Each structure stands twice: as C-alpha cells, then as structure tokens.
Image (tube, coloured by chain):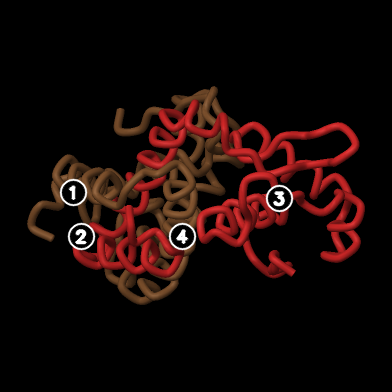
Chain colours: A brown, B red
Amino acid sequence: MLLTIDLASDQPIYLQIRNGVVEGIANGKLKDGDMLPPVRMLASELGVNLHTVNKAYKMLKLGGFVKMVRNRGTVISLGGSGRDSKDFMEAATETLRNIVSEAITRSIGREQLIGIINRLYHETGGDRL
Amino acid sequence: MLLTIDLASDQPIYLQIRNGVVEGIANGKLKDGDMLPPVRMLASELGVNLHTVNKAYKMLKLGGFVKMVRNRGTVISLGGSGRDSKDFMEAATETLRNIVSEAITRSIGREQLIGIINRLYHETGGDRL
C-alpha cells in the first residue's frame, strides 16, 4: 500500500492522502498514467469516509497531478501540472516565511533548514534537481 | 498596527494572528516583556471574533512565545520557548517534506527553495543566524 495515514496527526486526513500521492509521484513510485484506487476502495482500505478520499482526489486534480478518465477512474497525469507552479511557489514562500520566522525566534540558523531541504531532496530521489 | 490579516486567505485567521506575532518577534518589532493588545481590543481592531484572537493567543502560549500575567494580560516571554524546539523541528520537517515533494514533481530545484530561505532570513532580520 502506497499510503499510510496517521489518525492521531494534526494534519487532516484528506491532506495526508493528497500529500502521500504527491510524494509517491516525487519519488517515482507513481508514474504518469498510473491509476489511483477507486475512491470507495481506498476509503475502505484506510478506514476513512468516502468524502475524505474524494476531497483528496479533488485537490490532486486542482493541483494538476491527476485527471479523471471515464471508465478508468483517477489517473496520474502531470501534463498540466506546470501551469500553476507560480501559485505553488507563492504558497510555499508563505509557508517558508512562517517556518523561518519561528526558527529565528528559536535561534535556529538557516544551515539547519537548508540541511533538511538537502536531505529531503536526497530521500525523495530529487538529487538530480 | 503590527498585524494585518487577509480575510480572503486560505489560512485561518487565528493562524494569521499567531504567525504575525511570531514574525514580529523574529524581526524584533516585538520584544520580551512587550504586551499584546487585550483580546477584546485586538478582536475589535481586526473585526474578528473574540474566540479567534483567544485561540491565537493560546497557541502562542503553547508555543512558548507569551505568558499570561495577572493584571497585565498577554506578554511576550521567550524564556521557555527553547523547550519544544524539537517539536518545532519535527513539524517543520514534515511541512518541508510536502513542499520538497511537490517541488520535485514540478522540477523545481533545491536552489530555488534555498534561495527563498536565504531571502526570508535576510528580510526577517535573521542574517546573523
């Protein structure tokens, strides 16, 4: 199973599903054209509500990671994902601003954050980038 | 006024308030011992619910940024903030993991993210770190 969710996490489950799929695409476990499990099946496997999985799939569609194909279901499709990298970069910058602010109040230097980013690129198979 | 909030943002208002205060501490506009406005006053200034401001102040207390002082109100106090930097680093790493994953799917290299972090440290006055 590609996805693991943590029911005790602060992060909503639909976001965990959405982020798990994005991570799967990043590390190459999910490739263009791969089919995601039907909503009903994934909901049952994870023990969560149908609407939760539906919400995650809708977010993936909005982000340009999947498309809905008649008779096939939800399919990884990165064709259009470049289109809103500007939105992604803006949102990422806002999130990074909050992390950097809090880091500064804790006297945590940029090297620590940069070290984490380098490690995550490595772990997620993004070393070429 | 230290805080500006964006009612149209995806980010909940209590988080915007919380993050605004943390940013104020990071950039030195708020210093140890400074008093935050009373909940009722800030709620009125921002045009938001009392509970929203209360929630933000409670989060700041949990994060070790403020303490509640009898007869004075909510006061910036960083004495205990080092205590849960481990929690902060764990949460920050999870958030960075999501950003890095999505960046990789968009062929955005680490240099771009690292460049943003360097810029944010500079802007927020954390160049010494």
Looking at this view, name the residue that lies furthest to the front. B33
Q: Nearer the viewer, mark 3 or mark 1?
A: 3
Q: Disc 2 marks which residue? A: B110
Using a 10 Å C-alpha cutoff, classify the residue at mark 2 as few (fewer than 14 neighbours), some (14 to 19) or many (20 or more). Answer: many
Q: Is residue B3 left or right of residue B51?
A: left
Residue receiving disc 1: A118
The amino acid type of the residue labelled 1 equals Asn
Q: Can residue A36 be seen in this snapshot?
A: no
Question: In this picture, is A19 found above or below A7?
Answer: below
Query: Marks 3 and 4: in contact by CB < 8 Å?
Result: no
**Residue beneath disc 3:** B34
| Chain holding disc 3 | B
Q: Are discs 2 and 3 located on one and the same chain?
A: yes
* Same chain shared by disc 2 and disc 4: no
Depth check: A127 or B28 in front?
B28
On the same chain: label 4 and label 1?
A: yes
For the residues beneath circles 3 and 1, the answer to whether they share a chain is: no
Q: In screen coordinates, is A5 left or right of B72?
A: left
Q: What is the quadrant of residue A69 in the picture?
A: bottom left
- Rendering coords of residue A60 (x, y %): 43, 55
Disc 2 to disc 3: CB gap under 8 Å: no
Q: Same chain, marks 1 and 2?
A: no
Quadrant housing residue B91 = top left
Which residue is identified by label 4? A97
Coordinates of residue B118 in the picture (x, y in percent) = 30, 64
Task: Give the secondary structure at mark 3.
Answer: loop
Is there CB contact under 8 Å for labels 4 and 1?
no
